[in-house]
Structure formats: C-alpha cells, structure tokens
Amino acid sequence: MNSPMYFFLSHLSLNDLLLSTTIQPEMLQIILREGSSISQAGCFTQFYFFSVPTVNECLLLTVMSYDRYLAICNPLRYSSIMDLKLCILLATFSWVCGLVFPFPHIVLFNKMTFCGSNIINHFFCDLPPLLRLSCSDISVSETVSFFNSIPLVFLPFIFISLSYINIILAILRISTSAGRQKAFSTCSSHLTVVCMYYGTLVFNYVIPSKGQYLGLQKMISVCYTIMTPLLNPLIYSVRNEEIKKTITKIIFRKKYIN
C-alpha cells in the first residue's frame, strides 16, 4: 500500500483531523452549555485553523484527481510521472497554500472595529458571520475572499471536472465490462468525496447569507466541517478492496493473538 493514492490519503486524514479538532470541541461546548464565549484572539485563531484544512482539502482533492487521471488515462507512464518526489512536492504545495492564503484575513480582522452585538450567529468563527459583526469597511476583505476563491475553489473545481471528463471517456473506451468496472472503482471514492465536499462548500459561500438562508447555511456548514471528515474514512475504506483486505487481516491477526 505504498502507492501515491495512499500517500495523499494519509495527508487527507491528517487534514480532516485538524479540521475536526478545530471545530468540534467548541461546538460540543456550545451544545452542552446552550452557548459559549470566546475571546477575539481565540475567534481569529479558530478561523485561521479552520481555513487551513479547508483550503488544503480543496487542493488535495485536486491533486488526487490528477493522480486518478494519470492512473487511468496514462497508466504506462504513471509510475515514472507520479514518483515520490512529485507526491511530496504536491502535498507540500497544498499545505503551504493552506497556511498562507488565510493569513491576509487575519491581518484585516485585526484592523477592523467590532461594535454593537458581539453574538456570532454560528457555531464557529467563520468569515461571513465575523464580517457581519464589523463596523468597519469590509470591502477589502470581501475582495480578498473573492480573489482567493479563484485559485482555491473555482480553478480546482474546473480542473477536477476536466480530469473526470477525460477519465470517463477513457473508461468508456475499455472493451470489457469488468475492465470498465475495475477502472471506475479506482476513482469512485474520490468522486464521491469531491461531489460531497464541493457541493456543500460552494452552496454555502455562493448563496446570499441573509434571511432564511442563515439557518440553512449553518446546517450546510455541519456537512463540510463535521460530516465530511467523519465520512471520508468510511467512503475510502468501504469502496477500496485493498483497504478492506488490510483491515480484515489486522482484525483476524488480533483475534488470533488473543
């Protein structure tokens, strides 16, 4: 299990762990106490460490789509192109972007003035509810958010879409049904996660955050902050024969030892 796919899955697991530990403890405290308080510095810190895995997951899913594209559309050159050096380079690039891109918002937050109500209408410190509390001009922050979304959301989504168009065309050219099924099974897990993650993420940040949409957006936030990290291991393990075989061996080995 030393293939590039498992290398990227390990980074995706670490990313989901960071996202879960950033959001869920505070969310559980809000549920148990029917509300909670957080300092301004703590709120900005939570926003930053929420943004890092959010940005990183967008790029990791893009990298994994490229990996699946090479494996299916260019299998003879796959090993020579997707070597360990390129895997480390792509993973490092994703993490560096995740660390760098949210930083301008932190700088802008520290220059803003927050007045009036100090109640955040959300279960964590996200960008839209924080901007709604600001008495300062938020146009710069909105502009930064828009320009960040181009390389982090829209371009990766277009790249993933084009990759899967080529993958589907390549699968349709396979003569046997067993071959088509095997080829599709290698990318079905990733495609499921992409649809689930991007669907909720784009919906939550494209729909206007006013009126009846506020409650709906909080529900959608639960999907990509809690449900996606929870379901990712299940989706990749249930739909991957190698992972299922490895888990089965570990379970039976433990029973044999006991």
Image (tube, grey):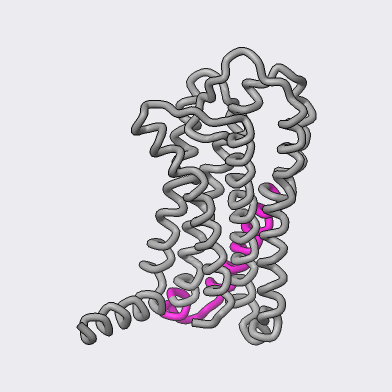
Q: x, y (%) of residue 23?
A: 49, 43
Q: x, y (%) of residue 241?
A: 38, 77
Q: What residue range appears in magenta?
A: 154-181
Residue at x 53%, y 55% (from the top left corner):
194
Was residue 164 drawn as part of the magenta stretch in this picture?
yes
Q: Nearer the viewer, residue 83 or 194?
A: 83
Instruction: Specify whether residue 156 is in view.
Output: yes
Q: Nearer the viewer, residue 237 or 253?
A: 253
Q: Nearer the viewer, residue 158 or 46?
A: 46
Instruction: Please tell me whether residue 109 is drawn above or below residue 225 in the rendered image.
Output: above
Was residue 117 drawn as part of the magenta stretch in this picture?
no
Q: x, y (%) of residue 11?
A: 56, 65
Q: Report the label total.
A: 0
Residue at x 73%, y 45% (from the top left corner):
150
Which corner quadrant of the image does residue 51 belong to? top right
Q: Nearer the viewer, residue 101 or 191?
A: 101
Looking at the magenta stretch, what is its main secondary structure? helix
Which corner quadrant of the image does residue 232 belong to? bottom left
Residue at the top extreme? 116
Instruction: Specify whether residue 205 is in view.
Output: no
